[in-house]
Image (cartoon, grey):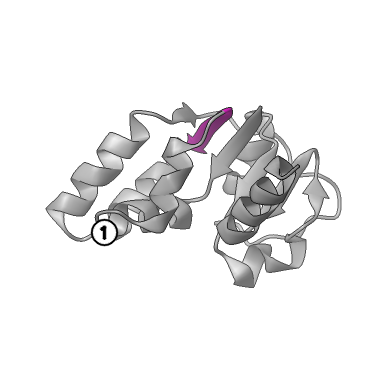
């Protein structure tokens, strides 16, 4: 089973409009969705419309929210605002960290950091699709 940690930008994108493509994450079998209070608050803050906030609240009902954080793995360089994302993913023992943050997490895309594979959502869907093929 995949334990997928969702960055704030993934939560934001899933709630931004009805039938957002990233909302497919909530329909996947054999996954546990996880995020942090920090990421959930950031996504909520950045959503400007009431209906978007309502969608996010409903999505978060099916997500385990982590409050504690683990230390960063050695050699990982992230801005202060992004460190809690990886730290919470580590604390959650996530198998994957999904983020659209190419600027800060991009250098780590496709890499395993302390047991967490960092991927953009599209690549996660692509890999998952390939894994299910005979």
Q: Give how far across and how far down residue 95 sits, in percent.
A: 70, 36
User: Is 20 on the left-hand or right-hand side of 77?
Assistant: left
How crowded is the residue under tag 1: few (<14 C-alpha within 10 Å), some, or many (20+)? Answer: some
Residue 108 seen by the camera: yes
Q: Which residue is mark 1?
A: 17
The answer to whether any part of residue 83 appears in the image is no
Q: Give the quadrant of residue 133.
A: top right
The chief SS type of the magenta part is strand
Rendering coords of residue 48 (x, y %)? 20, 61
Q: Residue drawn 45% across and 57% down? A: 9
Q: Nearer the viewer, residue 30 or 92?
A: 30
- At 16% from the left and 58% from the top, the residue drawn is 49
Above or below for 8 versus 91: below
x, y percentage for residue 75? Answer: 85, 55
| Quadrant into which the N terminus falls | top right
| Quarter where residue 63 is shown | top left
Q: Residue furthest left?
A: 50
Could you tell me residue 122's position as x and y percent? 58, 60
- What residue sits 31% from the left and 52% below the top? 15
Which residue is farthest bottom? Answer: 103
In the drawing, does residue 8 fall left or right of residue 58? right
Residue at 57% from the left image edge and 65% from the top image edge = 101
Q: Is residue 61 magenta?
A: no
Q: Is residue 36 magenta?
A: yes
- Relative to residue 118, is residue 22 drawn left or right? left
Residue range corresponding to the magenta coloring? 30-37
The quadrant the C terminus occupies is top right
Q: Is residue 60 left or right of residue 120?
A: left
Q: Secondary structure at mark 1?
A: loop
């Amino acid at each position: 089973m995949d334990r997928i940690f969702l960055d704030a930008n993934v939560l934001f994108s899933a709630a931004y409009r009805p039938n957002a493509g990233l909302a497919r994450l909530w329909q996947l079998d054999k996954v546990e969705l996880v995020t942090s209070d920090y990421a959930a608050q950031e996504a909520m803050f950045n959503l400007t419309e009431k209906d978007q906030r309502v969608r996010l609240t409903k999505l978060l009902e099916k997500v385990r929210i982590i409050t504690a954080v683990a230390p960063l793995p050695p050699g990982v360089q992230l801005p202060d605002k992004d460190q809690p994302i990886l730290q919470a993913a580590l604390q959650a023992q996530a198998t994957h960290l999904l983020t659209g943050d190419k600027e800060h997490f991009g250098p780590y895309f496709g890499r395993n950091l302390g047991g967490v594979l960092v991927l953009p959502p599209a690549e996660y869907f692509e890999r998952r699709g390939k894994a299910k093929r005979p």
